[in-house]
Image: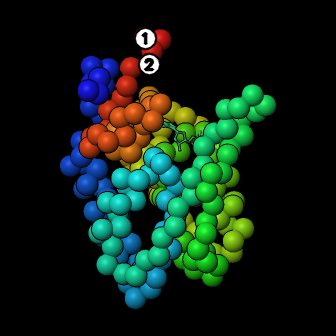
Amino acid sequence: MLNMNKLSLLIKKEEINAEINKYANKLNEKYENKELSIIAILNGSLFLFSDLLKKLKFPIKIDTITVSSYSGVKSSNELLYHKKIVKPIIKNQDVLIVEDIIDTGKTMNSVYEYVNSLNPKSLNVLVLASKKDTPTKFKYKYDSLFTIPDKYIVGYGFGIDDLYRQLENIYTIESNEE
Ligand code: 5GP
């Protein structure tokens, strides 16, 4: 069984659904009679990606990028790309990157520059959450569905040691030091 004792409810699934609906409506207006390539950054954005796609009414194409912070012996600060884009759906296309959260902005800076190097016609970024007291160093404009306190969150695709991702709501989790 999952240990729910350390969790406090932060965002209910109904609130998440309402924000995704609003954003999907904006995209439905903006891309009416157009096409959009949507790139998910895995694993964290799985739920947002899936829920958003189901609400879109215009043609879309999808691919995924899997990236993580490399915590090997040599460098704990480097990003490791486990999977990059494999489909030719970026060049001269309108592209939206979907990410779970921007914290320091390091991951998104790297992914943005990688996708941008494939020459999209336009490039936008959607994140589920950003942390209000963290000065992000992400260098580009982005849309964020929720602004949250500077706490570690789990659920709705967010994991800790890869656990808790399957929860439908978003929770803050007590750190082990507390
Ligand atoms: P950044 O490169 O912006 O510092 O970190 C982004 C990545 O760190 C996210 O893609 C996410 O995987 C992880 N991350 C940052 N804050 C949280 C959090 O509160 N909860 C979880 N589960 N992951 C987080």
Q: Which class describes the residues within 10 Å of circle 1: few (<14), some (14-19), or many (20+)?
A: few
99 sits to left or right of 7: right
Residue at image point 69% right, 71% down: 118
Q: Which disc, if any, is residue 175?
A: 2
The C terminus appears in which quarter of the rendering? top left
Is residue 67 visible from the viewing direction of this image? yes
150 sits to left or right of 122: left
Q: Which disc, if any, is residue 121?
A: none
Q: Amino acid at mark 2?
A: Ser
Q: Secondary structure at mark 2?
A: loop
Q: Answer yes or no: disc 1 within 8 Å of ligand 1.
A: no
Q: Answer yes or no: disc 2 within 8 Å of ligand 1.
A: no
Image location (x, y in percent) of residue 107: 62, 47
Image location (x, y in percent) of residue 124: 54, 65
Residue 112 vs 5, above or below: the answer is: below
Residue 148 vs 7, above or below: the answer is: below
65 sits to left or right of 71: left
In the depicted view, which residue is nearer to us: 119 or 27?
119
Marks 2 & 1, CB-CB < 8 Å contact: yes
Residue at image point 51% right, 33% down: 133
In the depicted view, which residue is nearer to us: 164 or 143?
164
Distance, label 2 to label 1, CA atoms, is: 6 Å
The N terminus appears in which quarter of the rendering? top left
Colouring style: rainbow
Residue at image point 31% right, 78% down: 57
Q: Classify residue 169 by image quadrant.
A: top left
Image location (x, y in percent) of residue 24: 33, 67
Q: Amino acid at mark 1?
A: Glu
Residue at image point 40% right, 82% down: 59
Is residue 108 visible from the viewing direction of this image? no
Report which residue position mark 1 lands on: 178
